[in-house]
């Protein structure tokens, strides 16, 4: 997928990993960046189109899909599955575990998106978990 001139929807774009994705898509030349958040007034990033979107609300999801369908219909929409462990955001500040930066996760995800990949294992933890799924001892069951 070519990011330049694309239309994208980002959920949780007012902070953390969602905000990092919004910044990266703008920097890479996306034509339209729809920035979803429960409270769109909290989205202050220039160049995005705030969208009321609480992903736990069926009404919000339906309204967002309706308003975005024209922009997405004109392009071949690609879905990328992103697996990641702990990301260094305000949500994980009290967790004492290795963390990736939001920017590192976004870089890996956008590289994979541009390469046409369908899945991203964005950090060492998710790579180990996936690898271990075909072994006798799954990494996600290991005790630290």
Image (cartoon, grey):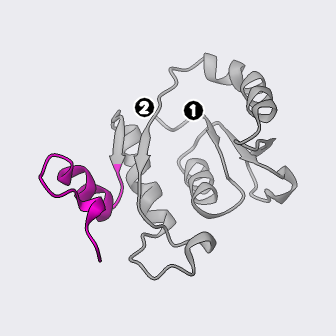
Task: Name the image quarter holding the C terminus.
Answer: bottom left
Question: Along the line of sight, which residue is nearer the eye, 23 or 42?
Answer: 42
Query: Residue lying farthest right?
Result: 41
Q: What's the CA distance linking mark 1 and mark 2? A: 9 Å
Question: Along the line of sight, which residue is nearer the eye, 68 or 97?
Answer: 97
Q: Say few, some or many: other residues with alpha carbon within 10 Å of mark 2 (under 14 / 14 to 19 / 20 or more).
A: some
The part of the chain drawn in magenta is 121-144
Name the residue rendered at 41%, 57% in the picture. 84
Name the residue rendered at 76%, 22% in the picture. 66
Question: Along the line of sight, which residue is nearer the eye, 142 or 91?
Answer: 142
In x, y percent, where is residue 102? 50, 65
Q: Where does label 2 land, which residue?
A: 1
Relative to residue 17, is residue 76 depicted above or below? above
Q: From the viewer's perspective, is 11 left or right of 137?
A: right
Q: From the viewer's perspective, is 46 left or right of 80?
A: right
Q: From the viewer's perspective, is 80 left or right of 60?
A: left
Q: Secondary structure at mark 1?
A: loop
Q: Specify which label sits upstream in the sequence, 1 or 2.
A: 2
In x, y percent, where is residue 125? 31, 63
In x, y percent, where is residue 11? 65, 46
Name the residue rendered at 70%, 42% in the picture. 55
Disc 1 and disc 2 in contact, CB within 8 angstroms: yes
Name the residue rendered at 72%, 26% in the picture. 65
In x, y percent, where is residue 98? 38, 76
Q: From the viewer's perspective, is 140 left or right of 84?
A: left
Q: Is residue 54 magenta?
A: no
Q: Quadrant of residue 6?
A: top right
Task: Name the image quarter holding the N terminus.
Answer: top left
Q: Where does label 1 land, which residue?
A: 6
């Amino acid at each position: 997928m070519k990011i330049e001139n694309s239309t994208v929807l980002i959920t949780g774009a007012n902070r953390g990993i969602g905000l990092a994705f919004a910044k990266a898509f703008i920097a890479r030349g996306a034509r339209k960046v729809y920035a979803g958040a429960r409270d769109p007034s909290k989205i202050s990033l220039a160049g995005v189109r705030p969208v009321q979107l609480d992903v736990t609300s069926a009404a919000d999801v339906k309204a967002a899909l309706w308003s975005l369908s024209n922009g997405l219909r004109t392009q071949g929409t690609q879905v990328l599955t992103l697996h990641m462990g702990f990301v260094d955001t305000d949500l994980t500040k009290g967790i004492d575990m290795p963390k990736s930066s939001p920017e590192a996760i976004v870089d890996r995800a956008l590289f994979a998106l541009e390469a046409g990949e369908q899945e991203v294992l964005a950090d060492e933890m998710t790579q180990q978990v996936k690898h271990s799924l075909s072994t006798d001892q799954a990494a996600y069951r290991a005790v630290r």
